């Protein structure tokens, strides 16, 4: 991320990801929510391409934006009519959802700030000590498979998500 254009592209894509993520959650039409999720997945592929991980960007587009989204839409169409609107949540459920979301966001921020990332040190420790940490280093550490690298948990979660979708389709077929 050495040029101004890359920085501008980063912020534009980050804003788009945040907007489409919120639209995914608040949309009452399930196929629209799946479409918004597709845009979020494509935005994360742009981040991979910006970091120089062309293979991971292509995998993100092919597997997640392509394959997983097809499974989502397929399972949605199996379980309900596409023009159905989700019912509005009552205020009790909305309050619980908002509070759980806020707690989850705080825990996620704490986890990212304190997890061992670079040479066993947390990101906040490395940033406060002063050496320059590039986006390429952070991207490599998140997508590597060595010690203190997180590619294996990332892929394990994707397999778990696929198993959940297959289970949902199986349950929907038995109705």
Image (cartoon, rainbow, N blue to C red):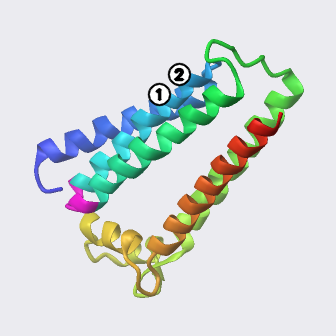
Marks 2 and 1 close (CB-CB < 8 Å)? yes
The residue sitting at 60% across, 58% down in the picture is 108
Q: Which mark is residue 167?
A: none
Name the quadrant containing residue 163.
Answer: bottom right
Q: Position of residue 31 (x, y in %)?
A: 55, 23
SS at circle 1:
helix
54 in magenta: yes
SS at circle 2:
helix
Front-lying residue, 61 or 89:
61
Front-lying residue, 59 or 142:
59
State whether residue 64 appears in this view.
Answer: yes
Name the quadrant containing residue 55.
Answer: bottom left
Residue, far front: 174
Quarter of the image containing the N terminus?
Answer: bottom left
Residue labelled with disc 1: 35
The residue sitting at 72% across, 19% down in the picture is 86
Neighbours of disc 2 within 10 Å: few (<14), some (14-19), many (20+): some
Magenta range is: 50-55
Q: How many numbered discs? A: 2
Front-lying residue, 83 or 16:
83
Q: Which mark is residue 32?
A: 2
Query: Residue 110 vs residue 48: left or right?
Result: right
């Amino acid at each position: 991320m050495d040029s101004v254009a890359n920085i501008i592209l980063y912020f534009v894509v980050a804003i788009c990801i945040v907007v489409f993520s919120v639209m995914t959650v608040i949309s009452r039409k399930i196929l629209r929510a799946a479409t918004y999720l597709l845009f979020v997945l494509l935005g994360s592929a742009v981040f991979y391409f910006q970091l120089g991980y062309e293979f991971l960007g292509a995998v993100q587009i092919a597997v997640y934006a392509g394959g997983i989204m097809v499974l989502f839409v397929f399972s949605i169409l199996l379980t309900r009519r596409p023009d159905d609107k989700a019912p509005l949540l009552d205020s009790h459920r909305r309050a619980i959802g908002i509070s759980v979301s806020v707690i989850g966001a705080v825990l996620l921020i704490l986890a990212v700030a304190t997890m061992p990332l670079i040479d066993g040190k947390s990101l906040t420790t490395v940033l406060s000590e002063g050496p320059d940490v590039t986006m390429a280093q952070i991207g490599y550490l998140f997508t590597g498979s060595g010690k203190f690298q997180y590619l294996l948990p990332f892929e394990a979660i994707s397999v778990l998500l696929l198993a959940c979708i297959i289970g949902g389709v199986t349950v929907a077929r038995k109705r």
